[in-house]
Amino acid sequence: MNRPIICYPAGSYARNNILRWEKEGLKPVCFADLDKNKWGSHFSSADRTRKSSVYEILPLNVAIAKYPDYLLYVTADPVNRKAIYDFLVEQDFPIERIAFPDNIEWRKGCFYLGKALQLSSNSILFCCGAIEFKTVVPYLAEEPFEEVLARYETEKKKLIDAIRKGISTKCDGCPIFEEGFYEINPKTDLIQVVSSRWKGQHCNMQCCYCIVESELLANYDDVDVVETIHHIERIYGKNELKYEFSMGELTVGTFCNDVLQILLQKNRSCLISSNAGVFSGDINKLLELGLASLLISLDSGTPETFERIKGRNWFERVTDNIGKYSNNGKQGSHICLKYIFLDGVNDNIKDVDGFVNIAKKYKTNVSISGNQLKAPSTANTEQTFEMITRLYHSCVAEGIGISYTNFTFGYEDNLRLKKLFGEV
Ligand code: SF4
Ligand code: SF4
């Protein structure tokens, strides 16, 4: 049933967007507002050079009485949208009668769900946000890839539909599964490649926290990553695809050069996680073109701790490569140095300060991570938190951009981090 659409409120955000919404097919019967000064006047676009239709502005209760089969479109700006939605729910407007323009809805979800397609050799996953909660679509090398992707899209719709209906799903319990505004039909545009899960991949380091090298994937080596990415480009290529390479070391894969060439040819933006043990000219080209962001886990500020964590005496070599990638600081803003905090290993002043000096020298950003992937329920110790705080304040003092990866920390630590970062 096509319900008559009442747009509410009749504010400047709606005036600035009505032309676009009309073009996208929105046909409201009227606008409503609580401001009595607007009642009886007429609403139209703020753009005087192009004409929108003209709508009457009614008090909300009058509009509802006039159009009892209404659908209420919340035409407030993104900042006030949630408050207005809450107000309407408080006023007992049925949730199913409230909608939003711009193809969004209020439900549980996360940044990845519906947008991310994670290629993990012969499986497709819905996210790389939280390892243990993933939903998986397995496939075989000989299966036509169109059919694989059709199954992925069907599973994705089923998952989002179940969430919408409040049915329990694999996302339940995920630390980043939260209520928010999400697209109704999210478009796949984030291609995540788990670098470790492909033929010819063996890492050149042995990090103590590694979760990928331990499950080396003898059973998952029958799909060709370059061919798979060509399929992805053929099928989703019209979307503004972004790539992420993580969990494993891209530069040591036999497919690395071919994959990077595809990114260069297609002008694709990408986030590459690397241990920087090997300097790649193609990654550097992507950096120079402004297409790549590079995430390097350094996790230390001294050669001794580096070796203890990474299993290699490569501190100098890696910091030299960071210098080359940053072009002595000129490209540092595209590089983020990661610090995975490990209790009793790198949560000390010498390492934290040494690390900040490197970030400062090469003008990189910094990202803090917990060891959640290895020990999901473990909260960080007070000593670790003291060092996280030290790192945060040093970065702020030096003007170094700093962030944290929320899903690698437990619930309590996330609350503490939100406070530290001034988010609450
Ligand atoms: S499991 Fe978590 S990260 Fe993955 S799609 Fe669900 S909410 Fe998002
Ligand atoms: S660099 Fe990455 S893949 Fe290699 S051992 Fe370390 S965590 Fe594992």
Image: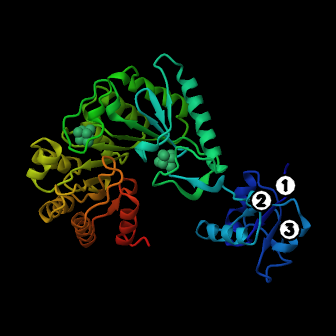
Q: On the image, numbered disc 1 is attached to which residue?
A: 3
The one nearer the camera, 7 or 285, is 7
Which is nearer the eye, 377 or 357? Answer: 377
Q: Amino acid at mark 2?
A: Arg
Badge 2 is on which residue? 97
In the rendered image, the vertical position of residue 120 relative to residue 179, given as above or below: above
- Cβ atoms under marks 2 and 1 closer than 8 Å: yes
SS type, badge 1: loop
Query: In the orientation shown, which residue stands out farthest toward the front?
Result: 377
Indicate if the residue with disc 3 has its beta carbon within 8 Å of ligand 1. Answer: no
**Quadrant of res 19:** bottom right
Dot 3: element: helix
**Residue 64 marker:** 3
Q: What's the residue type where badge 1 is placed? A: Arg
Mark 3 and mark 2: span between their CA atoms?
11 Å
Q: Is residue 277 left or right of residue 147?
A: left
Say which residue appears at 39% left-offset and 36% top-offset: 193
Name the side, left or right, on which 73 lies relative to 2. Answer: left
Name the spot of residue 399 as percent of width and height, x first: 27, 69
**Rendered residue at 62%/67% (across/down):** 82
Q: Quadrant of the C terminus?
A: bottom left
Q: Whole-percent x and y of residue 253?
A: 28, 29
Frontmost of labels 2 and 1 is 2
- The amino acid beneath tag 3 is Ile
Residue 370 can be seen in this image: yes
